[in-house]
């Protein structure tokens, strides 16, 4: 699947305008009658992020998958993954674990209108596999959330893992 299949590309102009502060009236705030009320978005997406964290640490693959958009796309540690690959990988990964804890810090949420938001944070994982291997990583994660039919789901993710004990 190419990135062109990712319908989140519709977000690029909105992301650019938000980050660069461009647009008519040239301020960092949305203005005009088309400006969406985003006051509720941060709280809703933060709740969705912590639902994702809870599913992750509970090793509940199906709950993690339920939070993904059917068009989900991920770039992790230099590898591109589509929805089907992530679904398969998530089920296999969760089934291989004995223990999984992760701390997510420095959570930032940037609303990109009423139905989109970017969430970013730093993670620190401690994972013990059923084979007895201990894996400890840290790194950044960025998630693009999309509301579809009233439900927030992750449309895109980017994460990099760096060993804690290097």
Image (spheres, rainbow, N blue to C red):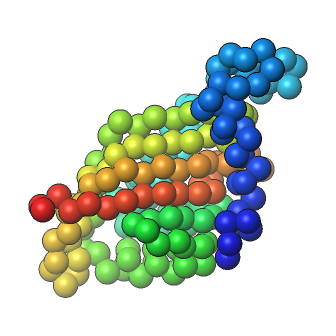
Q: Residue at x 23, y 77 (%)?
A: 129
Q: Position of residue 140 (x, y in %)?
A: 37, 50
Q: Position of residue 22 (x, y in %)?
A: 70, 26
Q: Quadrant of the C terminus?
A: bottom left
Q: Is residue 49 left or right of residue 104?
A: right
Asked whether residue 31 is in view, the answer is: yes
Q: In the current view of this chain or complex, which residue is farthest to the left?
A: 165
Residue nearest the observer in this picture, 28 or 44: 28
Q: Residue at x 28, y 48 (%)?
A: 103
Q: Position of residue 109 (x, y in %)?
A: 52, 35
Q: In the current view of this chain or complex, which residue is farthest to the right?
A: 33
Q: Is residue 58 left or right of residue 145?
A: left
**Residue 116, quarter of the rendered image:** top right
**Residue 118, quarter of the rendered image:** top right
Q: Residue at x 42, y 58 (%)?
A: 159
The relative height of residue 91 versus residue 39 in the rendered view (above or below) is below
The relative height of residue 4 versus residue 84 in the rendered view (above or below) is above
Q: Quadrant of the N terminus?
A: bottom right
Residue nearest the observer in this picture, 143 or 152: 143
Q: Position of residue 27 (x, y in %)?
A: 68, 16
Count of numbered marks:
0
Q: Is residue 85 left or right of residue 55?
A: right
The relative height of residue 115 versus residue 96 in the rendered view (above or below) is above
**Residue 87, quarter of the rendered image:** bottom right
Asked whether residue 51 is in view, the answer is: no
The relative height of residue 106 versus residue 54 in the rendered view (above or below) is above
Residue nearest the observer in this picture, 129 or 25: 25
């Amino acid at each position: 699947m190419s990135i062109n299949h990712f319908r989140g590309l519709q977000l690029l102009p909105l992301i650019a305008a938000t980050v660069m502060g461009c647009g008519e009236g040239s301020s960092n705030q949305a203005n005009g009658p088309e400006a969406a009320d985003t006051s509720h978005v941060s709280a809703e997406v933060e709740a969705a992020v912590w639902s994702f964290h809870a599913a992750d640490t509970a090793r509940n693959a199906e709950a993690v998958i339920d939070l993904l958009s059917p068009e989900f796309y991920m770039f992790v540690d230099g590898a591109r993954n589509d929805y089907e690959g992530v679904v398969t990988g998530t089920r296999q990964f969760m089934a291989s674990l004995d223990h999984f804890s992760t701390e997510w810090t420095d959570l930032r949420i940037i609303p990109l209108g009423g139905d989109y938001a970017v969430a970013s944070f730093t993670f620190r994982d401690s994972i013990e596999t059923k084979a007895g291997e201990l894996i400890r990583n840290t790194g950044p994660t960025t998630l693009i959330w999309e509301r579809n039919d009233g439900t927030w789901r992750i449309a895109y993710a980017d994460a990099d893992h760096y060993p804690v004990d290097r």
